Amino acid sequence: MPETSRPKGPSKAPVPKRPTWLTWLLRFILWSLGIVAAGAVALVCVIAVALAVAYPNLPDISDLADYRPKLPLRVFSAEGILIGEFGEERRNLTPIATIPKIMKDAVLAAEDARFYDHGGVDYKGMLRAGIANMNRAKSQGASTITMQVARNVYLSSEKTLTRKIYEVLLTFKLEHLLSKDQIFEIYLNQIYLGNRAYGFAAASEAYFGKPLSEITIAQAAMLAGLPKAPGANNPVNNPARARGRQLYVIDRMQEAGFISAEQAAQARKEDLHLRDAADPSRLHAEYVAETVRQLMYAQYGDSTYTRGLKVYTTLVAADQAAAYRALRRGIMDYERRQIYRGPEKFVELPNNPKELDEAVDDALAEHPDNGDVMSAVVLKANAKEIQAVRGNGDAVQITGEGLKPAQSGLSDKAPPNIKIRRGAVIRVVKTPKGAWEITQLPEVEGAFVAVDPRDGAVKAMVGGFDFDKNKFNHVTQAWRQPGSSFKPFIYSAALEKGFTPSTVINDAPLFFDAGTTGGQPWEPKNYDGNFEGPMSMRRALMKSKNMVSIRILQSIGTRYAQDWATNFGFEREKHPAYLPMALGAGSVTPMQMVTAYSVFANGGYRVNPYLVTRVTDHKDKVLIDKQPPLLNETLRAVPQRNAFLMASLLQSVASGGTAAKAQATLKRTDIYGKTGTTNDSLDAWFAGFQPTMAAVAWMGYDTPRKLGDRETGGGLSLPIWINFMETAIKGVPVAEVPAPPGVVNVGGEWYYDDYAPGRGVASLGVESGPTPPAEAVAAPPISAPAPVEERSRILDLFRN
């Protein structure tokens, strides 16, 4: 049978064979994905392990919820002007609500514009930083504000992977625990901004001398540019770089929409005036601030510098500024009369102009300006002209009258150490007419203090020519002979022994042997060497007659006078009971003198000087509140009638005596005081008062030496006192002091009513009247306050 054939269907096409390269590619992708997945799992495991290990070791940040950084001690004047700051860190803790919006915007623009949007870590920024670290791109920065807080508060600045991990972990912890505003507030108060300033409030005062609330856009941008590099971007150290950073911040503020284009343009044009530490117009109260520091440290110990104490003082800014100017002017006026001692240093100056600037900077680095007494390097000098340059590049040309203080240094015969020549470091000042004058830093020192005699509040205190030059406070620490300025206290004692302003006393020569003086034989003289014979006690004080004071003391008794002086606050052991006490041979401080003269000014009360009125913590909680003392009989030092008569005598001194220039210049009758010049003119004093202000000026060398044969308290210290009073009592009504009970006026002279003419001591040491015995008239009972103890003098003067 024939085979039947099957129908044939369509034939299958052969399956194409996969290329080998594709197979390997797929395998590679699968293996890669597997490896990545495994790596990711491993990374997660590593991170989990790292978190498990590292997170518990992170610092406890719960205390940041109540942020309390180290805050310095800050000292203020009565008006609230900052006069001193003590602590390792300048800082003024400022709540975020009180920080100006423009300051916050500037910081956000400069440091972290997305701060309120991200969770603490800027991943894009971290990626950019990572690429930059591989040198593939310029670094854009990766640290957010939260990360900076974590690093600045808790971590070091080392750049290691471990530290970075801790920083990120701590950032997450901060973001979890604190609100954005809390983190931002910590940043704004904690960040270091150069010049010892921590936080933007402190930086505003350090760089611009103004509170943060008054900041401008341009100033805010300058400050906001500091965190990135507070040293390199510091406007004091590197103005050009600081300016570049400021412009960058202004641009970023505009880009972020924080300011308009018009505001940005205005900010770019604004001239920034930095606070100048050497500015002579700023308030100088360094001695006051240091005294307060000592007081606070005695009270609070080491915490004084970290707990943010704010101390408000009795100091009146206008009075303090007047006192500072007056004392420096008086000292410099005296210095102009001294022999020129020569330049402070000589340096070799290159001829290359580019190298010259650097040489000048190096030369003046160790000779900074001293207020208005500025340093300069001489470029050219001859008998008719000095050309010099200051550290800031200003040219100085001195001619004519400006050369007179240093004529000896311009002479061809001047010795090498005196000769003014190229490379000499000299001192210059501006005259009132704006010309330059050569001068020198003074060697003499001075002191000035003023108090309100009605309560003892210290209104001004300048302890020396310059605090940086000499930190010794001559107001509270300098024990010097008061000279004739002590005579009023001898006269005051005499009034209680029956003497009157009209008592006639002989101004005639005296001689005392060693047994009388307690030392060497003594033949005292009047200052002018002349003797005028019999005169009234009033006239004797007006003319400061030494012979009269000695005769008075001889009459009333040295022991009695010594006891009487303690009523005014003087220390018994500092005033030995010998006749030289009549001429002020004991030891006093200017602070003691102003306290003592206040007794005459306030009607016979002794008020202790005080400086601190209020102390608060950093949250303004009051810790100490000092109320001015009320004058009452428990404070009485001498009878009211004694103070009244002594004020009358001192008024005569200021109107027609050795201090006549006082009333003549001030053109008012309620001026009282006494000059004082010690033996050999070692010390020059003027102590005086107006009923609302008592003040004392002193000049002398720390190591006592002659001020000069013609130098007196009336010529040196009185002008300082007058210059101060011209400001301090300007506009104060002339005080009319009424006569108290117990005094009478007979023939134009004041007397105690029981010692009126015919009943007191009529004359002393003259033929017309006998010398009364020392205890002829009993003194009324006055309880003398205990003398101040030797220990802790500065503190005791202000503690009460």
Image (tube, grey):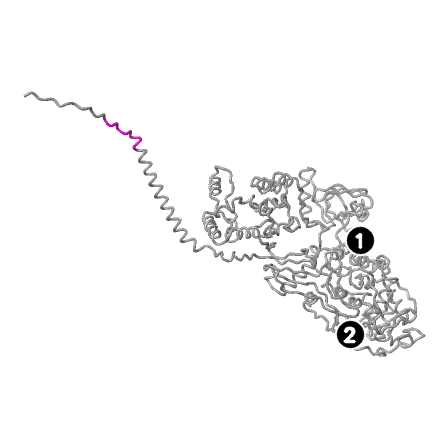
Q: Position of residue 234 (x, y in %)?
A: 61, 45
Residue at which label 2 appears: 563
Residue at the far left in the pictured view: 1
Residue 590's place in the image compared with 381, above or below, is below
Residue 300 pos. (x, y %): 61, 64
Look at label 2 and name its amino acid: Asp
Query: What segment is highlighted magenta in the picture?
Result: 14-23
- Residue under numbered circle 1: 333
**From the viewer's perspective, is 297 left or right of 752?**
left
Main secondary structure along the magenta-highlighted residues: loop
What is the quadrant of the C terminus in the image?
Answer: bottom right
- In this rendering, the answer to whether 630 lies above or below 418 is below
Q: Earlier in the sequence, mark 1 or mark 2?
A: 1
**Figure quadrant of the N terminus:** top left
x and y percent of residue 514 in the render? Answer: 82, 73
Figure quadrant of residue 475: bottom right
In this orientation, which residue lies closer to the viewer: 491 or 76? Answer: 76
Q: CA distance from mark 1 to mark 2?
A: 39 Å
Query: Would residue 563 appear left or right of 32 to someone viewing this image?
Result: right
Residue pushed farthest right?
A: 768
Q: Residue at x 37, y 48 (%)?
A: 45
Mark 2: secondary structure? helix
Residue 17 drawn at (x, y percent) = 26, 28
Identify the amino acid type marked 1. Answer: Asp
Tell me the SS state at disc 1: helix
- Disc assigned to residue 661: none
